[in-house]
Image: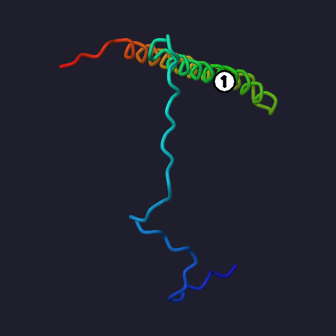
């Protein structure tokens, strides 16, 4: 295949925008819903984060089971699939531990009153 000509004045790529050029409108981040009356501040957000973390862990556990099955179906050895499962389980357990510590820290941070100076 012949190479394209590189004559002066001919470019094959579209001109790149200047560094200071405006990009387009960005949306403002959505605000979290207001807490319902009678609930403690921070508990609704903490429960939502806990639900999301639980979903992540559930999907990770599902993948820990699914990936080795798929490896065996496509011809990988049982030992290789077992090693993969062991690695995935260890990564999932570590992530679950870090998520629970993070959630515990967030809960403690929202409950603790702030000092005013």
| Percent coordinates x, y for residue 47 in the rendering | 54, 16
Q: Quadrant of residue 70?
A: top right
Q: Quadrant of residue 5?
A: bottom right
Residue ranking furthest to the front: 37
Q: Determine the residue positioned at 51% across, 29% down.
A: 32
Quadrant location of the C terminus?
top left
Q: Determine the residue positioned at 49% across, 10% down.
A: 38
Residue ranking furthest to the bottom: 8
Quadrant location of the N terminus?
bottom right
Considering the numbered disc 1 on the image, is that residue within a helix, a strand or a loop? helix
Q: Quadrant of residue 82?
A: top right
| Percent coordinates x, y for residue 108 in the rendering | 39, 12
Residue ranking furthest to the left: 117
Instruction: Depth check: give the residue in front, 104 or 97.
Output: 104
Q: How many marks?
A: 1
Q: Determine the residue positioned at 49% across, 11% down.
A: 39
Instruction: Depth check: give the residue in front, 47 or 93.
Output: 47
Mark 1 surroundings within 10 Å by alpha-carbon count, few (fewer than 14), some (14 through 19), many (20 or more): few
Vertically, is 111 above or below 87? above
Instruction: Depth check: give the residue in front, 90 or 9.
Output: 9
| Percent coordinates x, y for residue 19 in the rendering | 40, 65
Task: Tell me: 3 left or right of 49.
Answer: right
Task: Tell me: 79 left or right of 105.
Answer: right
Vertically, is 113 above or below 95? above
Identify the colour scheme used: rainbow
Instruction: Depth check: give the residue in front, 50 or 80.
Output: 50
- The residue under label 1 is 59
Task: Tell me: 32 left or right of 66.
Answer: left
């Amino acid at each position: 295949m012949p190479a394209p000509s590189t004559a002066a004045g001919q470019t094959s790529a579209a001109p790149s925008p200047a560094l200071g050029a405006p990009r387009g409108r960005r949306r403002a981040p959505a605000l979290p819903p207001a807490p319902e009356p009678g609930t403690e501040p921070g508990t609704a957000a903490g429960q939502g984060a806990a639900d999301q973390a639980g979903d992540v862990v559930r999907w990770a556990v599902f993948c820990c089971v699914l990936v080795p099955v798929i490896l065996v179906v496509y011809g990988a050895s049982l030992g290789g699939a077992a090693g993969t499962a062991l690695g995935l389980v260890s990564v999932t357990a570590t992530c679950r531990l870090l998520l629970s510590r993070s959630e515990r820290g967030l809960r403690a941070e929202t409950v603790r009153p702030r000092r005013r100076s």
